[in-house]
Amino acid sequence: MQDKARNFKLKLKKTSPKKNTIIIASGVILVMLILAAIFFWPGNKDRVIKTAGGEIVVKERPPLPTKPVIKEVLLSPDTPTSQDFIHAQPVLKHADMQFVKYSYQWYVNGDAVPDGKTNVLDRQYFKKGNTLYCRVKAVRGKIEAEPADSDEISIGNSAPILNLLPVPHFDVPGEFRYKINAEDPDGDSLTYRLLEPQDWDIFIDRKTGIISWFIDAAPVDTQDQVQPALRPEDEDASSSRKNRSEPEPESAVPAIPDSIQIVFEVSDSDGASATGSIELVLSSGRGSEVPK
């Protein structure tokens, strides 16, 4: 038994130095890993540049991913009418990403537009009341991202369009007639209304837009009119009326001026409107149209 115990102790003495070496090597490797994690961990990537006036800290951005991602697709204008061209603008999640190409597909009332392959949808492909959206796909090299859809928008009502014709020659005194030339892009029915002036018996037919005015007198140039001098008895009579608080006599209908502007409004059945005007030079029997 003693011989076996002696042999066992000898074996322990021979093998223990190897274990110590393994333990020491393991400790060294662990320390090196900790130091590498401290010095090479991608935490703060800022670089400090020393200059004559001090130090400048330059922020270093992490590398961009290779796959483009569309964050949203914006449509402009966001409240279009049938008279607009609608644009689609994709917005990348990483705005600094370069070499990105886009493909577009427009949908009107849920159906793909055959010619809707660009970022602009021509107004010939939609009308009032339609709904539409655009689907955009981003490609960068051989990498193709998932498509993104814009919000769905509706086409609103368009205001009437005035195409005013030249005012023809007319007689003074005499009857003046003029047709307001207007159209509605959406095909709505139109009504016409006189805005001003309201005190010259000028009429506009609500359905046809025909302006009619019977000019019963020639215009009066107010600059050429000479005001008669007041006589003493007139001054006394005027003063007497004021003292008795008598009402002044009603003024006569104002004389027709040398020129007058007729302002009108054209409205469609959906509530949109446009205004325009024509100016009549009564002294020469001529006029001009002034659309607004």
Image: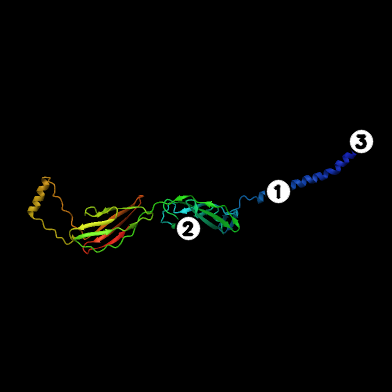
- Tell me if 77 is positioned left or right of 272 in this view: right
- Looking at the picture, tell me which residue is in the foreground, 18 or 253: 253
Which amino acid type is shown beneath numbered disc 2?
A: Val
Q: Quadrant of residue 209?
A: bottom left
Split into 4 quadrants, where in the image is the C terminus? bottom left
For the residues carrying marks 2 and 1, which lies nearer the camera in this image? 2
Instruction: Calculate the distance from the C-alpha at mark 2 to the C-alpha at mark 1.
Output: 57 Å
Mark 1, secondary structure of its residue: helix
Give x and y (percent) for residue 164: 31, 60
Q: Earlier in the sequence, mark 2 or mark 3?
A: 3
Give x and y (percent) for residue 167: 27, 62
Q: Is residue 85 visible?
A: no
Give x and y (percent) for residue 172: 20, 62
Asked whether the residues under the numbered discs 2 and 1 touch, taking CB atoms below 8 Å apart as contact, a structural biologist would say no
Mark 2, secondary structure of its residue: strand
In this view, the residue farthest toward the top is 1
Q: Which mark is residue 56?
A: none
- Looking at the picture, tell me which residue is in the foreground, 13 or 234: 234
The residue that disc 1 covers is: 33
Split into 4 quadrants, where in the image is the N terminus? top right
The residue that disc 3 covers is: 2
- Tell me if 185 is positioned left or right of 224 in this view: right
Instruction: Calculate the distance from the C-alpha at mark 2 to the C-alpha at mark 3.
Output: 100 Å
The residue that disc 2 covers is: 120
- Looking at the image, what colour scheme do you see? rainbow
Asked whether the residues under the numbered discs 2 and 3 touch, taking CB atoms below 8 Å apart as contact, a structural biologist would say no
Q: Earlier in the sequence, mark 2 or mark 1?
A: 1
What residue is rendered at 9% in x and 50% in y?
Answer: 237
Local crowd at mark 3 within 10 Å, few (<14), some, or many (≥20)?
few
Which amino acid type is shown beneath numbered disc 1?
A: Leu
Which amino acid type is shown beneath numbered disc 3?
A: Gln
